């Protein structure tokens, strides 16, 4: 008879009483936090929501709203330009500065110690910026319709809202890239340089048809020019031009790739 004792069967391991939170749920939780933080920032809300509408009224004050800019009235042209400008402000300026400062304070490093996936932080920043950009677009539309007498069909209003909102993701990706590229002190001047440069060159403050021909050729390839052109084509009663769609998508791919590369580089440094 063998002296080896018989193996005692082990009791099955107890199942966890709680269900682990998925990566999506953690990302959504951070997204809600980011939206709440942003909406409590009065200065940011002023510049991203009210400032574009005020600038719209200022630029068009004393001018004939029925004057033509291409196929559009002056009021219709600047309504889309300022709605695009407002979305650009919300997603570019807000994203870049917050990410750079949070990196500098160690908040991003602390988040890496949590179960939140690495891409969850970036997605929450882009998502919160996109949420905040909606009011800026809507406020400019309300001003255009009630004060400037812009009249469009229902499908045009909905298409404009969808195009300008979706197109703003291009600049949200750019904001993430700038936030990972620059330090907390350098990010603001760098962002402002790009922000004002793209706004002016893209024809958001002044119709690009007033530019010299050589500058018009350059402006037509900027992301802001193509971005605003999407909505202007809808205002004119047609569909966005294929070239403008491709330019916007091309910049989205480039900015997203750059942001991803800079994010990975920052992760390796941590």
Image (cartoon, rainbow, N blue to C red):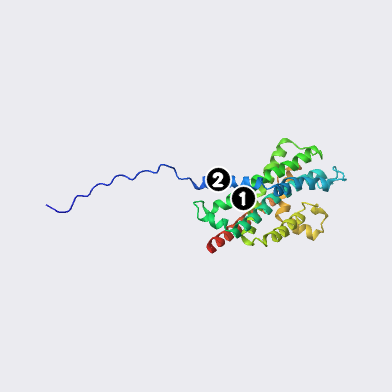
Residue ID for mark 2 = 29
Helix, strand or loop for disc 2: helix
Coordinates of residue 125 in the picture (x, y in percent)? 61, 51
Relative to 171, 75 lies left or right: right
Q: Nearer the viewer, residue 107 or 227?
A: 107
Q: Relative to residue 18, is residue 212 drawn left or right?
A: right
Viewer-proximal residue, 21 or 171?
21
Residue visible at 61% across and 48% down in the picture: 34
Q: Residue 219's image quarter?
A: bottom right
What x and y, as percent, mark residue 90? 69, 49
Residue 20 to residue 102: above or below: above
User: Hey, which residue is sitting farthest left in the picture?
Assistant: 1
Q: Is residue 250 visible in this depiction of the protein?
A: no
Residue at 64% in and 50% down: 169
Q: Earlier in the sequence, mark 1 or mark 2?
A: 2
Q: According to the image, label 1 marks what residue?
A: 126
């Amino acid at each position: 008879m063998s002296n080896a004792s018989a193996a005692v069967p082990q009791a099955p391991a107890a199942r966890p009483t709680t269900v682990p939170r998925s990566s999506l749920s953690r990302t959504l939780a951070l997204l809600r936090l980011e939206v709440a933080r942003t909406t409590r920032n009065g200065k940011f809300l002023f510049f991203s929501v009210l400032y574009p509408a005020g600038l719209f009224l200022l630029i068009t004050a004393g001018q004939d709203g029925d004057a033509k800019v291409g196929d559009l009235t002056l009021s219709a042209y600047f309504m889309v330009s300022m709605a695009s400008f407002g979305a650009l402000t919300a997603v570019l300026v807000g994203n870049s500065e917050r990410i750079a400062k949070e990196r500098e304070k160690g908040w991003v490093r602390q988040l890496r110690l949590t179960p939140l996936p690495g891409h969850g932080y970036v997605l929450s920043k882009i998502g919160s910026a996109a949420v905040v950009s909606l009011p800026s677009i809507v406020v400019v539309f309300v001003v255009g319709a009630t004060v400037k007498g812009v009249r469009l069909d229902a499908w045009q209003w909905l298409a404009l809202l969808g195009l300008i909102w979706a197109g703003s993701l291009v600049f949200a990706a750019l904001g993430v890239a700038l936030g990972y590229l620059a330090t907390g002190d350098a990010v603001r001047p760098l962002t402002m340089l790009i922000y004002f440069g793209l706004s002016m060159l893209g024809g958001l403050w002044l119709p690009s048809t007033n530019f010299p021909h050589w500058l018009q050729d350059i402006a037509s390839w900027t992301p802001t020019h193509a971005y605003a052109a999407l909505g202007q084509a809808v205002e004119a009663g047609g569909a966005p031009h294929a070239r403008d769609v491709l330019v916007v998508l091309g910049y989205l791919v480039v900015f997203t790739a750059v942001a991803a590369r800079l994010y990975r580089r920052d992760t390796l440094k941590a």
